[in-house]
Image: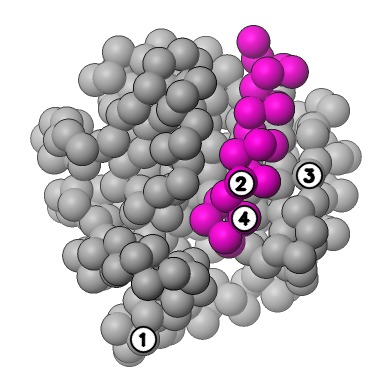
Amino acid sequence: MSVKLVLGRNISVEDKGEGIPIVFLHPPGLGKSVFMYQSHLSTSYRIITYDMCGHGFSDPANGQVTIESLAEELLRLLDELQVEKAVICGYSAGGSVAQYFAITYPDRVLGLILSGGFPYVKTFLKAEFLAGMKLLQFSPALLSKILVISHGKKKEEQERLWKTVRKTNQKNWYNFYQASYNYSCLNQLTSISVPVLVIYGDRVVHIKNFEEVYRHHLQQPHIAIVKNAFHEVPIRKWNIFNHLVHEFISAEIR
């Protein structure tokens, strides 16, 4: 683990392996520890995970956190790490930042991976976001516990996740939720020209709608549905997730 100075803030980064760089973007509340098993990919790729501003071991942002500011943070981090182009992988609302980044900085992106991603928030997902924001305001400890238990199955996983979640800045966390809730890239999806992989667990309620949207608006996206899985595919079904990532990059980017 190292610390990089980005936009005047210390950002906690893990940078392992060599080869094609893959940068993983976490959702609100959780930090880079949610990608603990993606380190296995470092035998073939350069794996970069980091705590976004105010999350885990990174300094909080002083101003409002937006999708645009999080994308700029990623851009500056890539510059700091001397990464010209990378595969950008966003998990859940981290996918909002990933999609914005791919649309805004296409010359820095080799490919886009979305795990449980969405181009906008609606219906059942809207209720989930609103519940999360309310809980964060009135019972952040309960929300933290829910996040840790839903992602970590083993005790050691939960302990590692808890170390990150308990340090997350509540204001930056809420801002990230709010920014993702309001973000829509539906009208810009057709401008994404890099290869795209979209991964969902088959037990997620809203996948059918978003799967159809991505198939309609993206140029020949790869859609993978993981059996007997909910939303937390990168950590709960990490073997399958890592295999899908490796297959995608091997076929589309090498």
Residue wearing tag 2: 239
Disc 1 or disc 3, which is closer to the eye?
3
State the quadrant of the N terminus.
top left
Disc 4 or disc 3, which is closer to the eye?
4
**Label 2: which secondary element:** helix
**Label 1: which secondary element:** helix
Q: Measured from the top left, where is residue 54 in percent x and y?
A: 23, 55
Q: How many marks?
A: 4
Three-letter amino acid code at disc 3?
A: Ala
Within 10 Å of the Cα at label 2, are there few (<14), some (14-19), or many (20+) other Cα atoms?
some
Disc 2 or disc 3, which is closer to the eye?
2
Is mark 1 in CB contact (under 8 Å) with mark 4? Answer: no
Q: Measured from the top left, where is residue 81 in percent x and y?
A: 27, 19
The secondary structure that dominates the magenta segment is helix
Three-letter amino acid code at disc 2?
A: Asn
Badge number at residue 237: 4
Which comes sooner in the sequence, label 2 or label 3? Answer: 3
Which comes sooner in the sequence, label 2 or label 1? Answer: 1
Residue wearing tag 3: 224
Q: Quadrant of residue 128?
A: bottom right
Report the span colored magenta: 232-254
Is mark 4 in CB contact (under 8 Å) with mark 2? Answer: yes
* 167 sits to left or right of 242: left
Which comes sooner in the sequence, label 1 or label 4? Answer: 1
Q: Is residue 120 above or below residue 127?
A: above
Q: Name which residue lies at 64% across and 10% down.
A: 254
